[in-house]
Amino acid sequence: MELQLTLKQLTYFRALAETGHYRKAAERIGISQPSLSLQIANLEAALELKLVERGRAGAVLTPEGREVLEKTRSILSEVALLQETSGRMKSELAGTFRLGSSPTLGPYLLPRVFHHLHENHPNLKLTVRDGAPSELLQELLSGVHDLILTQLPVSSSDVTILRLLREPLKLAVARNHRLAQKEIANDEDLKGENILALSRRFTLHNQVADLANSLGANLLYDYEGTSLDAIRQMTAMNIGVSFLPSLYAASEIPEVGGDVVLVPYRPGRLNRSIGLVWRKSSGHHKTFAFLSEIILSVARKEFSGLVSIEG
């Protein structure tokens, strides 16, 4: 039967090499000398090499033994580092995870989250990839992402969904639009109005389409945008009005001198829901739940008045 190489054999061999004596090595490890001798013999048999010469002066390494000792120290050092890393990951927020995020959300929320993680949880690292919500879910299920930050709803029985935020949608109009000077717009103001929206790849498209239908407004399918910037620019050209997420609006639309005007509409009643989603089969539920608390903490501190907490 072929003998297998074990970490125990390597540990015993290192102790023997460092003490130069079977009895001393056995005492250091806390085993009997015959047990140590047997493990060294098994190691030599597994490697098919003579590692130790036993004489009056004690244990002397052969040239092969010296080379194996160098490799042994490297292997045991890496094993110790792995055990240390494992222990740290069990006791605190740590590891590298792949996060998928909607481009209508991630660029405006995640930089503050990353800053918080860097300052307070340096052992947790996120790599981020943007994608349309329709693609993010499939990429999550196929293992491209470990978790996703996206607009809800998400339909799948294979994922855990944690609702985080409600983000208001802001009515944006061109500076020369008839509603630009109104203190507050109402549903009647938007009846028959042309409304711009992102493409069907975005969950926000469906929300805006449903709203347009309920208002008796016209959704401009011929002018679907590929980004929020594109929607804003088409709005500025008075092609139609649009509904922009508040985090984007706060980042890209100045209160004075912007290319579009934000008009109050359904304050506190027109929102999109944002959540963190991961596979039910994932072994990192505790870490992801803790990460959600970090996102909420950052939102409360950095985006007060722009978003509200779910629940």
Image (cartoon, grey):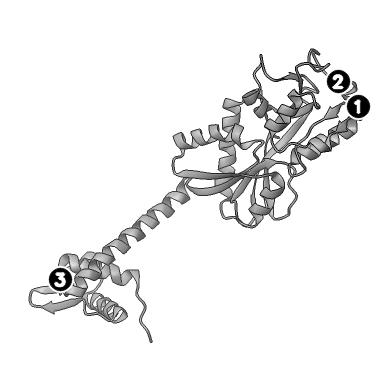
- Please give left or right for residue 261 compared with residue 286 in the image: right
Question: In x, y percent, where is residue 84?
Answer: 38, 53
Question: In x, y percent, where is residue 288?
Answer: 58, 46
| Numbered circles on residues, count | 3
Residue at left offset 41%, top offset 52% = 85
Residue at left offset 14%, top offset 73% = 60
Q: CA distance from mark 3 to mark 2?
A: 90 Å
For the C terminus, the image quarter is: top right
Question: In x, y percent, where is residue 130?
Answer: 61, 43
Give the number of the disc on residue 10: none
Residue at left offset 83%, top offset 38% = 221
Q: Are marks 1 and 3 in contact (CB under 8 Å)?
A: no
Give the number of the disc on residue 192: 1
Under circle 3, the secondary element is loop
- In this view, the mark in front (1 or 3): 1
Give the number of the disc on residue 186: 2
Q: Label 2: how many residues lie within 10 Å, few (<14), some (14-19) or many (20+)? A: few
* Amino acid marked by disc 1: Gly
Residue underneath mark 3: 21
Residue at left offset 72%, top offset 47% = 134
Q: CA distance from mark 2 to mark 1?
A: 13 Å
Q: Are marks 2 and 1 in contact (CB under 8 Å)?
A: no
- In this view, the mark in front (2 or 1): 1
* Amino acid marked by disc 3: His
* Amino acid marked by disc 2: Asn
- Please give left or right for residue 12 compared with residue 95 in the image: left
Under circle 1, the secondary element is loop
Q: Earlier in the sequence, mark 1 or mark 3?
A: 3
Q: Label 3: how many residues lie within 10 Å, few (<14), some (14-19) or many (20+)? A: some
